[in-house]
Image (cartoon, helix red, strand yellow):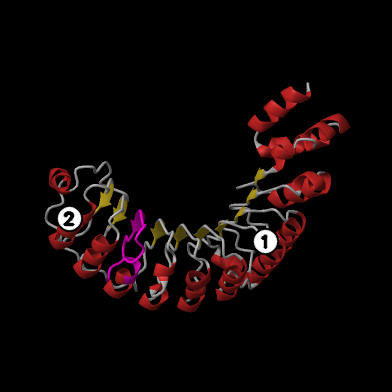
Amino acid sequence: MARVLKVVSTRLPQRDFISLLLVSPWLYRSLVSYPSLWQVLDLHEMNNAGDRLLSALSLCMESLQDLESLNLNVCQKISDKGIEAVTNSCLKLKALSIYWNVRVTDLGIEHMVKNCKHMVDLNLSGCKIDIAAVLKCRFKNVSDKSLLLIAENYQELKFLNLTRCIKLTDGGLQQILLKCSSLESLNLYALSSFTDEAYRKIELLGNLRFLDLCGAQNLSDQGLSCIAKCKHLVSLNLTWCVRVTDVGVIALAQGCSSLEFLSLFGIVGVTDKCLEALSRFCSNTLTTLDVNGCIGIKRRSRDELLQLFPHLRCFKVHS
């Protein structure tokens, strides 16, 4: 019976799985006896995620000591106190996602780095911040202070998502680039405040494969030339990077010959010259290329692009 329960539990939504702890003492003992069931906890989009999380912590504290991955995306009632409670109990956390949690501030990040020393995957995305709630409650949200804490404590970090953390500056990002050299994925979507200076040391990320700069309106050819030194880059989103021209994309083609995904969507300053360079250096690897809205590029039809990039499978990233 215990084996059957273990199999069934792995297929249940975790919101139901946690509720089973309250059904009977036998169920409770059986469930907490399998540490592997408690290595991942997904409470995303739960209105009462805070209560569920505290219940799980109080009911199975010993089992949650092995928790490695926690998803609290869109759990908007989770605050710094919730982050403190979970990180105090779950010291083995390696992955934490708190997308759209407007109540988490630098203080929550301070609790996290103090307690959890093995983090490799961190999603602090502030996408769709509830501005009214922020103003009403005077939340400070995530700032450069958080980036400094992350840089000093998580030098083995591999995945970092900072989407729409709008209070960040060049100085904060530079701390990440200087100290988190193991990063493989960096998401800076909709962070228009970063300038070329922010990317000056990005070549220190020798393992970087994924970079999202959609909406980086202050990125110019100078900054893109620095990014071009990331030799192992496979995926790059330059959508709406409106200051970029052929000069930057040609440097990118020459430096990043392993590119598989590239979006130039909406960049009016690029022409067929950059496509020729991309074809010369990346034609064997590119499978996704979006040049929609690039009015300076005349050879934009599907057939014309396939002549330059025979392995293309996707021609449109944005609708």
User: Residue at the spot x=72%, y=62% of the render?
Assistant: 115
| In-image side of 207 versus 15 (left or right) | left
- Compare residues 211 and 184 and report the one nearer the observer: 184
Dominant secondary structure of the residues highlighted in magenta in the image = loop
In the rendered image, is residue 193 in sight?
no
User: Residue at the spot x=75%, y=47% of the render?
Assistant: 64
Quadrant housing residue 79 = bottom right
Rendered-image quadrant of the N terminus: top right
Depicted 190 relative to depicted 42: above or below: below
Depicted 247 relative to depicted 23: above or below: below
Q: Residues within 10 Å of mark 1 (few under 14, many from 20)?
A: some
Residue position for label 2: 280
Residue position for label 1: 117
Residue 230 lies in magenta, yes or no?
A: yes
Magenta residues? 226-243
- Compare residues 289 and 284 and report the one nearer the observer: 284
Depicted 250 relative to depicted 2: above or below: below
In the rendered image, is residue 93 in sight?
yes
- Single out the residue that lies furthest toward the right: 25
Q: Secondary structure at mark 1?
A: loop
Q: Secondary structure at mark 2?
A: helix
User: Residue at the spot x=88%, y=33% of the render?
Assistant: 25
